Structures are given as structure tokens and as C-alpha cells.
Amino acid sequence: MPQKSQKAWWKEIAVQAESVEDFLNKYYKHDRFRGRGEEYTDVLIKSYQEEFDRRGFTFISQHDSNTGRMVAFCKPEESQIKDQDQ
């Protein structure tokens, strides 16, 4: 079976959000994000925002995602990753 290209894989996990905090509110399991108190929530937001600023994307593991699968939020230009198979 042929492997998926990087672009195809990325399209499968990318989701829409207005900001990093919006991404976390929509896709992070509530009990692990807002359910541990405001200080913990603020630390998570800061950490995910720093990753987003540094790398151009951030993701939530399937363990912490309320969808049960890995999801990613990226800057618009990062969602247009060139297909490395070409």
C-alpha cells in the first residue's frame, strides 16, 4: 500500500479555528483543559501559543483531543504544505 504524502496527511488532521485559544476550546477535552483550573488553562494556552508562533502550527494528540484523533491548527500559509512526492 502506498504511503500518504505529507500534504494528504496534513489535510486529514488540520481543523479550522480563529486562534490558538479557540482551537483549544473547540478540540481539547474539557476536563483536561478548562477542568483543571484557570492557572492550568493559562499555562496550556501559553505553551500552545509559543509552539504556534515558533513552528507555524500546533496540534492536540488523540489522547487529549475530544475527537479521539490528532488534530492540528496552522497558519494559513502552513496549510499549503508542498507535496513532497512531486
Image (spheres, helix red, strand yellow):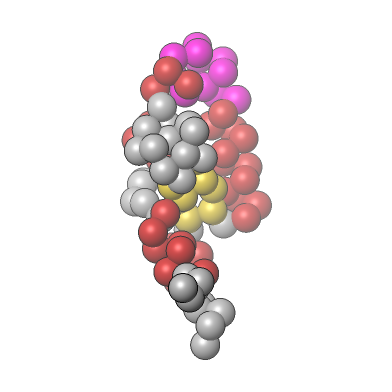
Question: Percent x, y for residue 59?
Answer: 51, 46
Residue 41 makes an appearance in the image? yes
Tell me if residue 37 is in the magenta stretch: yes
Question: Percent x, y for residue 18?
Answer: 36, 46
Judged left or right of residue 64, residue 49 is right
Judged left or right of residue 26, residue 80 is right
The residue located at (56%, 41%) in the rendering is 49
The residue located at (46%, 73%) in the rendering is 1
Compared to residue 63, the image places residue 34 above or below, namely above
Tell me if residue 56 is in the magenta stretch: no
What residue span does the magenta drawing correspond to? 33-43
Compared to residue 28, the image places residue 41 above or below, namely above
The residue located at (50%, 71%) in the rendering is 3
Residue 19 makes an appearance in the image? no
In the depicted view, which residue is nearer to us: 31 or 18? 31
Name the residue furthest top: 37
Question: Percent x, y for residue 19?
Answer: 42, 44
Q: Quadrant of residue 14?
A: bottom left
Name the residue furthest bottom: 86
Compared to residue 38, the image places residue 54 above or below, namely below
Name the residue furthest front: 1
Question: Percent x, y for residue 4?
Answer: 47, 70
Magenta segment main secondary structure: helix
